[in-house]
Amino acid sequence: MLRNLTRSLSRTPIYLPSSTLPRRLSIRKMASAAQDFNKMLYTPLAEIDPEVQNIIDKETWRQFTGLELIASENLTSLAVMEANGSILTNKYSEGLPGARYYGGNEYIDELENLCKARALKAFNLDPAKWGVNVQPYSGSTANFAALTALIQPQDRLMGLGLPDGGHLTHGYYTAKKKMTASSIYFQSFPYAIHPETHLIDYAALSSQAKIFKPRLIICGASAYPRDWDYAELKKISEREGAWLLCDMAHTSGLIAAQELDSPFDHCDIVTTTTHKTLRGPRAGLIFFRKDLENAKDLEKRVNEAVFPACQGGPHNQTIAAIATALLQVADPAFKQYAKQVIANARTLGQALVDHGYKLQTGGSDNHLVLWDLRPIGLTGSKVEKLCDLMGITINKNAVSGDASAQVPGGIRLGTSALTSRGMAESDIKVVADFLHRAVQLSLVLQKEAGSKMLKDFVRVATTPEEGKVGYKQVKELRDEVRTFATKWPLPGIDTSNLKKPTGLHED
Ligand SMILES: *Cc1c(COP(=O)(O)O)cnc(C)c1O
């Protein structure tokens, strides 16, 4: 039995504290005392479900051997993963602390109150002026709950257009279709970035708002490399009598670290995800003002919008993980992390500019850069595909002036995850060099493909063909990336025990 046990342990290279071994032994004892139909409750994952375990192992391997540059992603901590995988998942606690629909919530109440206090502290907020709801399952649900709290069905809202860096949940629609709940249940109208500066066009937004008369203006974005002028937005929304909501999902970690301007100075309500720069579990938060003369009931409206309007029971294991992440955010070390994220983004941008490439807005104030590939005749899809083959994860992204939304002309790169692996400026220069070589190789492959079709591009990149050199270079570059990436730690994982799992796609 012990032999079985150690084998399953060695196949589970994730966050296992040394105290786990005796715990697992006693769990074995409990299993043997259980009825047959309950024995499964004590069997470790690797043993009862090697299929799922293998998928986790492969994904762990992918994260370890690759370079993560998706701007919305990050690598959370050991402690957050422990909390997120805890027994708190068992508990129902619809309602709020002190006012639940079920019994047995004394510790869950303690947890949610702790999480709320930490959320306010992490953003330096006065509990007399701001409150927070920590129950949203994710950023999108937080946003829909915020809309539900603030405006009526079919009321008008404005958000940054999706092709200009806005998020789906900020009112996205196409000519043929209302795409998200924010445009299905509300009348939405997008504002834009300036066609030359590529900064938010506040003047145009102001005149559009005069005509459209929104009840709500949403600021914040998913692909905007610069900071926001919240004071200007406040002026516009006040003039129109509209709410001002900031969705700081991408930048909340940098805002908490006071490395970017604070939306709390001017906005009525602020939403965020907790898994991007904030580096916590996948979830959402809604902050609301408590001191608005004309909206004393905002707290009640937000809380009722989350539950019962949009959600049922909160995910208490996630709330525990948010609380732990927020404890880390309040640590002075997190400010150093945020500073490094920004320094790395600037270094990455500068390195690409030094290679002669074009960035939208020319650089970055935050964790991301938008790389315009059109001047060199490539599409975002091809570079994304090639980088994927090399173990560099990025995403294609619209850039200003794209002829078609279906063919994005750029890619979005973020430095949050690489900074969590410990990289600083000199390491980011190595990464920038990989990206430069990937783009140059994409040009070779495009030529060898003999067409501009993505499928031909993928064919020459993945299959050896007579007289074509691109395929071999893809393999070489992939090996170099892997050698570089595996020098770095992976948060929460003991990589010294990591073994290459079976069934990897690359084999
Ligand atoms: C990521 C993101 C969201 C959505 O978050 P999910 O957790 O994926 O639902 C909302 N708003 C913005 C601006 C985002 O970048």
Image (cartoon, rainbow, N blue to C red):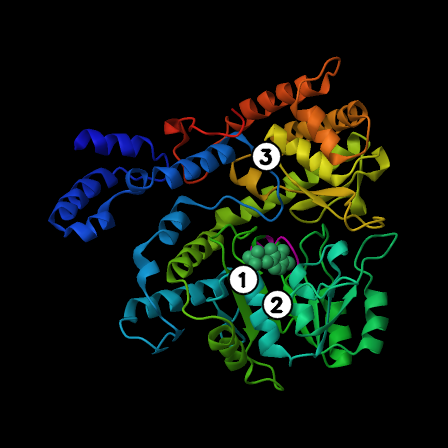
Indicate the amino acid at tag 3: Ala
Dominant secondary structure of the residues highlighted in magenta in the image: loop
Q: Which residue is mark 2?
A: 264
Specify the segment rendered in magenta. Answer: 254-261
Q: Secondary structure at mark 2?
A: helix
Ligand 1 under 8 Å from disc 2 Cβ: no
Q: Is residue 118 visible?
A: yes
Dot 2 surroundings within 10 Å: few (below 14), some, or many (20 or more)? many
| Image label count | 3
Image quarter for ligand 1: bottom right
Question: Along the polypeptide, which appears first: circle 2 or circle 3?
Answer: 2
Q: Secondary structure at mark 3?
A: loop
- The CA distance from mark 2 to mark 1 is 9 Å
Question: Along the polypeptide, which appears first: circle 1 or circle 3?
Answer: 1
Q: Residue at x 85, y 37 (%)?
A: 375
Question: Along the polypeptide, which appears first: circle 2 or circle 1?
Answer: 1
Q: Nearer the viewer, residue 376 or 491?
A: 376
Q: Is residue 241 magenta?
A: no
- Residue farthest toward the top in the current orientation of the protein: 467
Labels 2 & 1 near each other (Cβ < 8 A): yes
Indicate the amino acid at tag 2: Phe
Q: Nearer the viewer, residue 298 or 118?
A: 298
Which mark is drawn over residue 123? Answer: 1
Residue 288, how many percent across, how many down? 56, 73
